[in-house]
Image: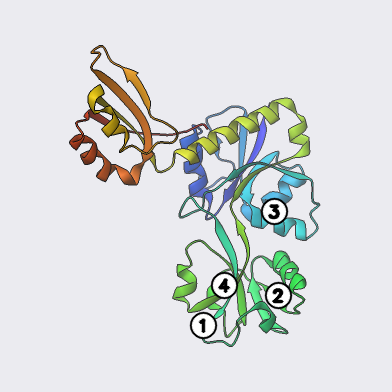
Amino acid sequence: MKLKLGIPKGSLQDATIQLFARAGFNIYVSPRSYFPTIDDPEIECMLIRAQEMARYVSDGVLDAGLTGQDWIAEHEAGDGKTGVLTSIADLIYAKQSFGKVKWVLAAPEDSPFRSAKDLEGKTVATELVRATRAYFARQGVNVNVEFSWGATEVKPPMLADAIVEVTETGSSLRANRLRILDTLMESNTQLIANHTALADPEKRTKLENIALLLKAAIEAQGRVGLMLNVRRADLAAVLGLLPALQRPTISALSDEQWVAVNTIIEERTVRELIPRLKAARAEGLVEYPLNKIVL
């Protein structure tokens, strides 16, 4: 069995490969090849632009792939059939952070445009052409939607009246003095597969296992494990300081007066928490990294 898996080429490529590494899959990309190697003999990888992933998975060229909800919507707003693709996992990560991105309608700060309806008869530049046309059709607004090959933020006001662009932090829009008028959609990465692949029991199981490990790697992001020893008499004070994923694990030690405590915490809280735990008479504190958390 060989699972043909599409890896998004471009801005999401490095974040995806890093996520797979945390999930236990090492992907090696050659600058001269579109076929990365992976240390799993049951998977065959191919680099495909996220914009085209839904098409190739839908057509059966690939069994599965990773792409955004935005490009799935763009595919289905065109010639792509709905219901052909199934999302196996909702993976909230992006190129700069573990979060969703937004496609927004934006116009120059000093323009008279305040909403989509103000753009009647105007030109809107975007890479997300079909979904943008569908958005304005729902608004009942007639606009000229033009495809943009990139650097979309610099096009208003000379080359377009407004744009529909993807943003993660909004910094690029602010730098180009653009004001957000509306949000068309939020998007994050999906692991998608076609129905033919899912009808194969071996491929389905493989995909479900990949999804489990990817979600576990995302869940572990920004968290660490913490172990410590404490006297039973001081246990309540220590537990009062510990936030936990659910509840700390408490284990008896050979000395009946002591217990071991094991928990999971947000990494950003460690620098403040450890001194407070030490002051509460905890001893033998050990912080350790986490690769996966399976819920």
Are dots 3 and 1 in contact, CB under 8 Å? no
Label 3, label 1: how many angstroms apart (C-alpha)?
31 Å
Callout 3: 10 Å neighbours few (<14), some, many (20+)?
many
Query: Disc 4 designates what residue?
Result: 152
Label 4 to label 1: alpha-carbon separation: 16 Å
- What amino acid is found at the position of numbered circle 1 in the picture? Glu
Callout 3 amino acid = Ile
Above or below residue 218? Residue 254 is: above
Locate the N terminus by quadrant.
Answer: top right
Position of residue 84 relative to residue 225, above or below, is below
- Number of dots carrying numbers: 4
In the rendered image, which quarter is residue 267 located in?
A: top left
* Residue occupying image coordinates x 79% and y 54%: 80
Query: In which quarter of the view is residue 79 placed?
Result: bottom right
Q: Position of residue 295 (x, y in %)?
A: 52, 32
Q: Secondary structure at mark 4?
A: helix
CA separation in Å, label 3 and label 2: 19 Å
Return the residue at label 1: 109
The residue carrying mark 2 is 145
Left or right: where does residue 202 sit relative to residue 295?
right
Which label sits on residue 72? 3
